[in-house]
Image: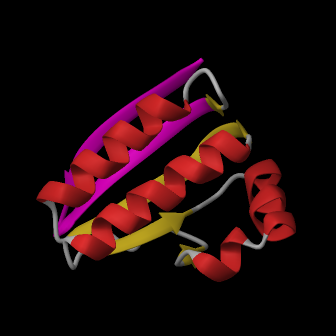
Amino acid sequence: MLEITTSARQDWCVVSARGRADTLTADDLEAALVAAAGTNAQVAVDLSALDYISSAGLRALLQGARAAQLNHAVFAVCAASPPVKKVMEMSGMDRILRVQGELPC
């Protein structure tokens, strides 16, 4: 199960994910990220409450970042939980995406 919320903080659109980003839920995450990237100049993805991320979840992050790039928006993955941070490091995603230890806003 994945709960996704979107909020505005200062000049940032913050997309927060709670639960599991896997093959069953990644499409929802991708849709939320692409929508946010299409309508905001700065998108922060808060992964502090994400317990698990699969390759499908990583793909959703990549698609969100790609949408942001196409719209000349800033896209940052922030505050990843320890298990998610480990997967991002092992997969090399931390070198592809802008990853920050905490939310920028």
- Position of 37 compared to 17: left or right? left
Q: Is residue 10 magenta?
A: yes
- Position of 100 compared to 31: left or right? right
Q: Position of residue 81 (x, y in %)?
A: 70, 52
Q: Is residue 90 above or below residue 4?
A: below
Out of 45 and 79, give the one closest to the viewer. Answer: 45
Q: Is residue 66 magenta?
A: no
Q: Which residues are magenta?
A: 1-19
Out of 55 and 18, give the one closest to the viewer. Answer: 55
Q: Position of residue 50 (x, y in %)?
A: 64, 40
- Position of 15 compared to 38: left or right? right
Out of 98 and 96, give the one closest to the viewer. Answer: 96
Q: Position of residue 63 (x, y in %)?
A: 44, 56
Residue at left offset 80%, top offset 69%: 89
* Residue 44 sits in quarter: bottom left
Residue at the limit of the structure toward the left, as seen here: 39
Quadrant of the frame with the C terminus = bottom left
Residue at left offset 61%, top offset 73%: 101
Secondary structure, magenta segment, majority class:
strand
Q: Is residue 60 above or below residue 52?
A: below
Residue at left offset 60%, top offset 17%: 1
